Each structure stands twice: as C-alpha cells, then as structure tokens.
Amino acid sequence: MFDVAVVGAGICGCSTAFMLAKAGLRVALVDAKGIAGGGSGAAGAFIAPKFVKSGPVKELSEAAFHFSLAWYEQHFGAWTSSSRLLHIANNALSNARVAYFKTHTSLPFSAPDPQLLTQLQPQAQAFESLLLASSAVVDVKGACSVMAAEAQMFKIHVKSLRHERGLWHLGALQARHVVLSTGAHEHLLDIPYFTPRAVFGHRINIHTTTHNPLNMHQFVSISKSDSKGIIAIGATHDVHYNPLRSEVSYDYAKGRMELLEKASRTIALEDVEVMEDFTGVRAASIDHLPLLGPVVDFLKTVETLPKISQGKEYNINQYKYYPNLYMMNGVGGYGFVLAPYLAVMLRNYLVHGSAIDPLVLPSRFVRRYMMQKCR
C-alpha cells in the first residue's frame, strides 16, 4: 500500500516520484519497460529553452529552463554535462523568430565570437544565431535511475485502474493517489478529451574526430564532444511515424543518414562512426502546453452538466473529477526541461495544497473537445 503510485517511468514519472518521495510520501513507480524505456530513453535530454515568441509557451519554457538547469546541476551533477548553447535559425521564419527572441528574452546571451563562427558551415553562418551562457545535456538512464531510487520500482504492465473504498487498485498494488505519466501510451481510463499527439524521436551517438566545443541547435540538436569524442545527434525525426500504431518497421539506416545530413549542414563531421541508436515516441498536446493536474471524469461530467454537450461553458470547478487521480503528460520534445518544474508544481499541490497554473490543467481540453463534437 502506497501514498502515491506513479504510472510511467520516463522523465515525467521519475521526476514526480523523486519529488514526492523527497517530500516524505511512500511512492510506487510502475512501468512495464523499466526506467526510461520509452520516449525519454530516446531523448537528447538537452536542457534549453524553447525559442518561440512571447506567450505562455515561452514564459513556461523559460521558467522551467531556469529551474531545471539548476536542479540537474545540484542533484545530478555526475549525470549532467553543462555547456554554452549555440542556437541557429534554419529558415526564414525561424530567422525572424530568433531575431525577435534576442530582443524579448531575459536569458543571458551573446553573439557568437568570430572564431566560433568559422567552425560552422557557410550556410549556418548566414542565419541569425545567439549564444546562451548556459545549457546542459543529461545522461538519461543515469539521472532517471537515481530519481527512481527514491521510490519503490515495479516493472509490471498495469492494464487497468480501479477505485474502491478510497484506494486505487493497480493489480496487486494499492495507492491513495495515482499519477498518470504514460506519455503516448494508453491512459488506462476513459479520457477522450485528450488524445496525445505522438512525436517520434531518433537519437544517435557517434564517434568523430571533429571536436565540437559546445551544444548546438539548428536542424537537429548536436551535443558537445565528450572526453572520448562522442557526440549525440537527435531530433523530432519523423512526425508522421508512430511505432505504437504503425505496422511498418522504422528504417534505422535511413534515419541515421538523415540525422547526419542535417547535422552536417551546421558543422562538418569527419570520420563518423555511429555507435548507438535510440528511438521512441513522446507525447505532445495540440496547444504546445503540458498537462498537469486532476483528471476530469468525462462521463460523469456530461451526465451532471448535460448542456456542456451543447457548447455551454462551465467553471472547471463544476466538472466531476476522478478521486485523487492526476496526469502529467504532453511535454513533447522538452520533457527534460519541463518535467522537474512540473513535478514541483504537483508536489506543492498534493503536499501543501498550492494551486496549479490553470494554463496546464487537463480540464482545459474538456470544453474544446465538446465543441468539436458539436460541429
């Protein structure tokens, strides 16, 4: 019997389990594949802000970036490689976006020095760029394993959830509270108002005689060289491919070639040997904001508020919620930036009764879903 059961041991689940266990709760962490066995295991795990114009996505991204960078360095320094980050636009639209970002951000940055620019390909030098003073790359398995060690890990496939007499039953496990961090996989309950947008990612670790002095983002993300000459190259590689739904196998050879070709547009890579492949599916939302907080019981809500099916707007406090059931999902390609920040928000909600930012509540999708059904 546990205080909290966290379903899903990717970065969202691991950071949540870590935060709640550190707060004194007895936490079970459950995943059929084990720690970082899905989309998180394929992530480049770059700790960087999202380079977008003003709005809630930018504000959340920058707040999470500040928090998470310090958090990884403080608690997981052995698994965190810090570096400056060179961000380069890759088309006319992103060129304008980077130029705008430079005049509307509080993050410390500078122009790349001339010597650094000479290491870039000519086409990369022609685009707008900025050099962030701080960024990092996290060792996915190492950091997630340390986080998970604060909880009790169960490598089991949870097929259903049942609430009875104040407890959630997950097979043989019981818990007062449950957090769903299942990514692009099944919800385990009927949550029709949120269908995760599956985003497929591919990362390769390569050995190269080219020395890359810092992290780079342009067409793909490229990590700085480690002491052995290993560089990680990763991307949201094929937005149309979803191995969870497709009967066609992913073409690894083609994927590697595309990643290397895109990386070579930024920096010339010599004597390349591909060491490892990592692939997986991340879950994103249609409004590019994550989902964190109590889960709406959709059927009971429609029964209680029948006019919602006609498009009537209700206060979210009038919705019916599953008891002590929460979601942490939809972090997309910025999971390692967002997850620790969101985990603190959830911890403060469960332990201290603090409010969760309404912008990330899952309930925001209920009326939108009903409006779409009414069309």
Image (cartoon, rainbow, N blue to C red):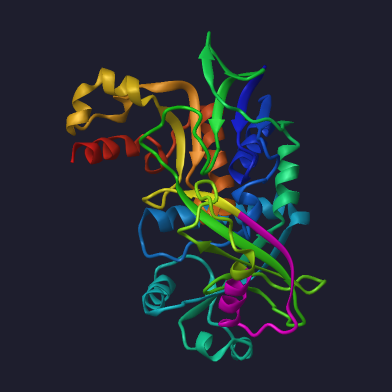
37 vs 16: above or below: below
Left or right of 312? Residue 290 is: right
294 vs 111: above or below: above
Q: Position of residue 175 (x, y in %)?
A: 61, 19
Asked whether 124 or 103 is in front, the reply is 124
Asked whether 142 or 239 is in front, the reply is 239
View extreme (top): residue: 165
Indicate the quadrant where residue 7 lies.
top right
Indicate the quadrant where residue 272 lies.
bottom right
Asked whether 186 or 104 is in front, the reply is 186
246 vs 173: above or below: below
Looking at the image, can residue 133 be seen? no
Q: Position of residue 232 (x, y in %)?
A: 68, 67
71 vs 319: above or below: below
Looking at the image, can residue 8 be seen? yes
Q: Quadrant of the C terminus?
A: top left
Residue at 51%, 15% in the rendered image: 163
View extreme (front): residue: 247
Q: Is residue 340 magenta?
A: no
Image: magenta residue range: 256-279
